[in-house]
Amino acid sequence: MLLRVTMGMALAETLLLAGVLLAWADRVAGGRLLAAFLVGIAVWISGNELPNWFGPGVETLSLHVLATAPLSAAVFFHFCVVFCRAPLRRGWITAAYALGGVAVLVSQVLVPAHFVDHPDVGRLALAEPAAVITSLSWVVLGLGGVGVLLHALMRPPTDGRGPARGQVAAVTASCLWGLACLGGYAIALMGWPVYPFPLLAFPLYPLMLVYGILRYGVFVANAWAGKALVWTLLLASGIAIVGLMPLVLPFESRWLSGLAVAAGCLALNGPVRRFVQRLIYPGGEVSALDLGRWRDTLQAAGSLERLGAEASALLTRRLGTPVAVIVQEEASAAMAANAAMGTSPGAGVEEGALVERPPTDRPALTMRRDGPSWTPRWTAWEAAPPGQRHVAELFATVLADAAVRVEQAQQAAARERDRQIQARLAELGALAASVAHDIRNPLNIIGMAVAMAPTETRQEVGAQVARIAHLTSDLLDYAKPWKLQRERFELRSLVESLIRRQAGARLSPAWPAEWWVQTIDPRRLEQALINLIENARGASAAGCEIDIDLDGGDGPAAASDGAMLRLHVCDDGAGVPPELRDRLFEPFASRSPGGTGLGLAIVARIAEAHGGRVALTVRPPWTTCFTLELPR
């Protein structure tokens, strides 16, 4: 009776696992073949057990069902080849199916077996001499599959092909376990006076086979296996306690037995769960102290870039292997920046602002904010042991919380900076208005006073008065509050009109014939471009060539990533002095002799008012290039 229940459990379990594999077939090489092999095992179990379930009347049907075993062995060989990516020609697989098919046809005709009674097994299929073809075929195919597994297991890890070695080892071990379980039938066939106990462990064979594969490819399988093992051990402990109660108590009491089982399971629950955790995730134990230390270290990071560096150091130290951790604010923004700002020389790469890409030669964890939450993306973790992957997943949850807090701190700091900037601008605006009023009257008096002076004097005084007036105008413009007037306009026409008034500037050939935008203030855009052109013209006393460019390409698709518009104003002047690079967009920082130092600061304000930015970029062969990035 116990064997009947055991084999019935194995049949149901095998069919259930075949369905699980079909659901996750895309994550496992050869997943559908393995599911077909499991169905073949279910068919073989049914062939053995039908006479025991329904009586001798179905023995002929059972023998025909058992005769399909060689075809299941051919499927197993095919699975091993696909799973291990063995370098075998397709002809080997064709030959395997041909051998299995011929053996099945011969067995269906000869039916080389009959059933006999066995005191422990019940009705047992006994092979006749004519079964040599069937037996040899599935033995050869089975050994061929195991040989493929052993070859993959001994393959050097630097080969770079095939599944993780742990997966191959798990499949090989499960096959050896299944062979050991079938030894129970050998005990019965040999007539040994021993109970065929190995058959009782047969339900573990398909479970070990499937879990050994999904352990690395489908991480949730580890959680399921852990829960199942915990409940199995607790159930076994309860049965053991019930069996020991008569030895402890001199009388029988169901209430005391039930109380002892409940107390024992409660007492063993913690130790059993910790044992299973270490068994399922070797090296993957994470304590509350670890989580607290990670949280404290990560939350001290002041920026997302610093957070990624701290996280990489922590995870590398914890796992003992180099792990790259990258924290990016938005996946779409990161990909767009990589595509538009360039990854090759001359593609417009902003200095010091490259968006990181995870390396492909070592495990990498990329945290990206998609909407309101941070989600992990895993790269090159296929060969990592489950213990390391378990640690990395727990670490990713702590890192996601830290990223939220760092982002919130950055936003609070940005709001405080904006408040301080607005306060300073309000003070500067009031001061600028007062200074402008007090300066313009004296300037008019000075201009009238030199009206009768020599020509050279009038010219010099006029130039200096114009310079002071320009500074005053820029100062007022920089300090006063703005309100953008967004309109729909044709960009090329605006830029061409501007170029006609600016000597030395030209459009690059990459400009499309038309380029309509509707989220930009055209007057402020024109002001920004004029300031950039004047800045470029002032960079060289001898003058220089100025190029206004879109991102390189032949049309709108090359000029924008769909969300941002990028204009480049480039010159071949003297370049930007190193001491000015860090404060280039601050007020009163100028690379032009006689400049006011407010032109680039105004450009930065215009970009920020639109929700964009301006940056010093590298675009050979130009010596200097400013990229104005505005939302479309």
Image: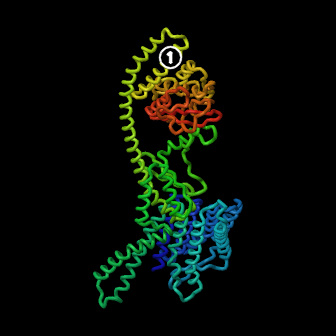
Number of marks drawn: 1
**Front-most of residues 391 and 441:** 441
Which residue: 50% across, 70% down? Answer: 11
Can residue 215 be spotted in the picture? no
The residue lying furthest to the bottom in this view is 250
Q: In this view, does 484 lie above or below 583?
A: above
The residue lying furthest to the top in this view is 452
Q: Dot 1, crowdedness within 10 Å: few (<14), some or many (≥20)?
A: some
Q: Where is residue 411 in the image (x, y as percent from the top left)?
A: 40, 44
Q: Position of residue 72 (x, y in %)?
A: 60, 67
Which residue: 55% across, 38% down? Answer: 579
Which amino acid, by three-letter code, is at mark 1? Val
Identify the element where label 1 is drawn: helix
Specify the quadrant that holds the N terminus.
Answer: bottom left
Which residue: 57% across, 84% down? Answer: 187
* Colour style of the rendered protein structure: rainbow
**Front-most of residues 393 and 132:** 393
Residue position for label 1 = 461
Q: Is residue 411 left or right of residue 561?
A: left
**Front-most of residues 164 and 395:** 395
Q: Where is residue 214 in the image (x, y as percent from the top left)?
A: 53, 63
Can residue 76 be spotted in the picture? yes
**Front-most of residues 114 and 179:** 179
Q: Where is residue 589 in the image (x, y as percent from the top left)?
A: 50, 33
